[in-house]
Amino acid sequence: MSAPHHHGHDHARGASERRMWLVFGLTASFLVVEIVGGILTHSLALLSDAAHMFTDVMALAIAIAAMRLSRLPADRKRTFGYHRFEILAAALNATLLFLVALYIVYEAYQRWVAPPPIESLGMLAVAVVGLAVNLACMRLLSGDADSNLNVKGAYLEVWADALGSVGVIIAALIVYYTGWTRADPIVAVLIALWVLPRTWNLVKQSVNVLLEGVPEGMDLSAIDKRLRAVSGVCNVHDLHIWAIGSGKASLTAHLILDNAQADVQRVLHDASNLLQREFGLTHTTLQAEFEHCDPDGNACALEDHAVTEPHAGHRH
């Protein structure tokens, strides 16, 4: 792979990390504002939302640390590098979201049983500022959320916080105009129910990567079928596809060639180009084999003829 591609990839990752730092700074700053606002207005709702905001700050810090660790070079003990830190951080972020959602439900029950007095105007003002901060953070993260599980986890955290701010605004308006303080726990439960399914989806994606499952959006059967259609290939076995991290899918496969006179390097080159062109797989290891039988035709075995070579079968 050419050097300019690496520079472009590194530039994109650097820009993503800078955006994460900016989101972290905005979120941490508003956390302080929300805590002070909750104390001054005696609003338990704002203090509760501040607890949610605190988990966001922690999750963003973990995500940034994971981005840095994932860039550490491979070594003799970790030949794929440290990209899995990114996935572990995404799984941890999802766990934090689950815990926060459960806390919201618990806090809602407490408020339903004993509604606290709320200074709705102060609560409304802080919530509006919080929503503006959340929307700005979501804008910063939206470009990378679909391609990076770690950023997606942070994006979901901020999105959940934005909904929390909307919920606080709605509750503050209801309390201000009607005096019905139980509107606050009702909105809190609705937010929790909205967050949980999306968090579960992030957990499933993270676990799939950790279990080396087929990456989301890739069809193993379709890839197998296309490899079998390569000229000179009669069968495929030991086909494996997994991901080291977000956007880092790898593939290994054994290609059985149809005759001993096949051009091995041409077949490997064609198969590798097909995988890159049609499926976006740039890290592939292919091995060519020939099927042969003993003179009496009683038994057949697979004989390795050629392994992948850097320019044809194994592409980075």
Image (tube, rainbow, N blue to C red):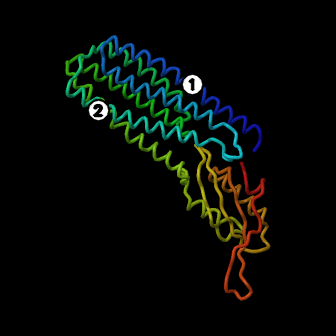
Q: Position of residue 257 (x, y in %)?
A: 71, 70
Whichever of callouts 1 and 2 sits on the residue coming sooner in the sequence is: 1
* CB-based contact (under 8 Å), mark 1 and mark 2: no
Q: Which residue is mark 2?
A: 106
Left or right position of 168 against 210: left
Residue 313 position (above or below residue 210): below
Cα separation between marks 1 and 2: 32 Å
Say what amino acid the circle numbered 1 marks.
Trp
Q: Which residue is mark 1?
A: 21
Task: Give the residue furthest to the top.
Answer: 40
Q: Which mark is residue 79?
A: none
Residue in the image at 48% along x and 32% along y: 155
Residue in the image at 68% along x and 50% along y: 282
Residue in the image at 24% along x and 31% along y: 109
Say what amino acid the circle numbered 2 marks.
Tyr
Residue 77 position (above or below residue 164): below
